[in-house]
Amino acid sequence: MTASEAGFKGRGSQTANQAADTDGRSNWVFLSNHGNVLLCIARDPRIRISEISDNVGIGERAAQKIVADLVADGYVVRTKEGRRNHYQVNAKARLRHPLFADLEIGPLIDALRDGNRTGSGVRTRTSQAK
């Protein structure tokens, strides 16, 4: 589900916090934009920046900056394949918060990426192996 399908306006014009305010929910989100971008990359290693921005509900420049942050900090490896990028998540990278700095991101990514999402079109390990 993209951000617009979830009721968020596209291209960063409305944040998740602002959207939550309009429907009566409290105004916090479980994952940061960095976490959401990382999950997009984990779900589709050939995803385009424009698709990331649409899915997360941020602008393309913000998506580019976040991907650059993830690459610079060793969470993602980016390689060029022709005119496109291919991404690989470093599952051995550690969570950044001091409370969880001893934990690798791999199990968290696996749990969120491979959760039971019927009808979402999200590629799982099983469908990728075919």
Image (tube, rainbow, N blue to C red):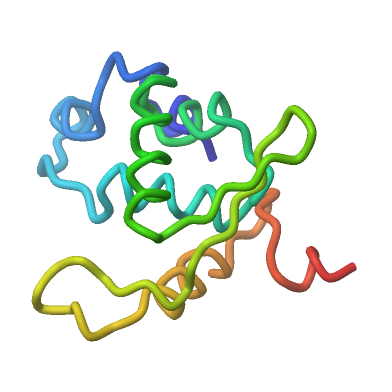
User: Residue 18 occupies which quadrant of the picture?
Assistant: top left
User: Residue 24 occupies which quadrant of the picture?
Assistant: top left
Q: Is residue 41 left or right of residue 27?
A: right
Q: Is residue 111 left or right of residue 47?
A: left
For the point 51% across and 73% down, the residue is 110
Most distant residue in the right direction: 130
Q: Nearer the viewer, residue 104 or 120?
A: 104
For the point 32% across and 19% down, the residue is 12
Q: Quadrant of the N terminus?
A: top right
- Against 47, residue 72 (above or below) is below
Residue 68, how many percent across, how many down?
Answer: 39, 39
Q: Is residue 25 left or right of residue 124?
A: left
Residue 46, how many percent across, how many down?
Answer: 68, 44
For the point 41% across and 60% down, the residue is 75
- Against 59, residue 69 (above or below) is below
Q: Quadrant of the C terminus?
A: bottom right
